[in-house]
Amino acid sequence: MAVKLVRGSDMLRWLRRCGEGRRWVVPAKEDRHWLFAERDGPVVFPPDYRNATVGPKGWLLPRSEPILYYRWTGGRVSVTPAQGWRPQVIYGVRPCDLKAIALLDSIMASEPWPETQYLTRRAHTVLVGMACTAASSCCFCTSMGVHPAESYAADLMIYPLQGEEYGVAAFSEVGREWLAQLEGEEADAAFSPAVPALSLPMPTSLEDLPGWLERRFDDPGWQRLAWRCLSCGLCAYLCPTCYCYGISDVDRGGAGRRVRWWDACTLPDFSRMAGGHDPRPTTTERVRQRIMHKLAYHPARQGEILCTGCGRCIEYCPMGIHLPAALRLLGGDGR
């Protein structure tokens, strides 16, 4: 890959110039947590920055948004699709979140019902990734087959080097157009940034994991895991690959809007039907569904694990539940 070397101050000026007229979404610290928020332009991250508590998913798939507006007039209804996108740059995205966006891109483009609002936002978004040079205590991306310097869905990838120097590489047409405007020397063709090893032990290989879990569908370890789960949904809301949603109508006397909002399969009413029947009435069944979907059902159908090892489920679950530890509770692999 072609890489240009540049100093940090020059890189920020170049990015700001290329992204003029777009909304800038960058990691920003609010209270004690890092979130992706709208700012005036790209920023320099402090040395202790690892990753945002809440990833950038919400800027492509918002927590809550209208999907259409309707109005009753003379016994007839008129429907207007919602328009809710702006050209934007999402900057400083770590490889675990870049991989998650690549997974969501595939899911949202699936026929026969592609998710047009997501795809429209995605088409008007430039992703600027930032390779990892240090791990947090909760990262396990390499356990999930994710490389901490890979570009995945990024248009541009930034590699922190020594001091204030960075390497920048392009991976899309818009990325190459931007990179052509950057003044900097070409790096050696063998350029390879130093990256940390980020892993936790897994009970089997990723290729064998779907079958390994299917054989443990009725394992008593699921109940031991459920005893620790509060059904709070925090893991799903922080997970960069979760995409379950609910839909409700907000009516205002003959006119209103249909709203889509994030939902979570671990919440008690998630699968409850209109007649009151719930096919997953217990916490055990809901916890099993979440993990089986990510690590067995989705890879069996789509060929890829639906977890990128970002570590948020480890760091922020109030009961300390996370995927590698959960797997060790199955089949006598843990206590």
Image (cartoon, rainbow, N blue to C red):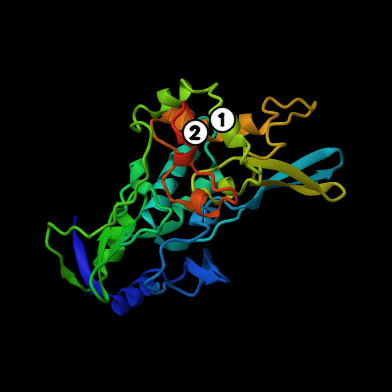
Residue drawn where x is 57% and y is 36% of the image? 225
Disc 1 and disc 2 in contact, CB within 8 angstroms: yes
Left or right of residue 162, residue 54 in this image: right
Q: Say what amino acid the circle numbered 1 marks.
A: Trp
| Residue under label 2 | 329
**Numbered disc 2: secondary structure:** loop
Residue drawn where x is 57% and y is 50% of the image? 317
Foreground of the two, 281 or 44 = 281
Q: Which mark is residue 222?
A: 1
How would you rate the neighbour count of disc 2 (Cα within 10 Å): few for under 14, some for 14-19, many for 20 or more? some
Q: Position of residue 59 (x, y in %)?
A: 53, 57
Q: Is residue 109 visible?
A: no
Q: What's the CA distance linking mark 1 and mark 2?
A: 8 Å
Choose the circle earlier in sequence order: 1 or 2: 1
Residue drawn where x is 49% and y is 57% of the image? 56
**Numbered disc 1: secondary structure:** helix
Q: Is residue 110 visible?
A: yes
Q: Position of residue 203 (x, y in %)?
A: 38, 33
Foreground of the two, 159 or 128 = 159
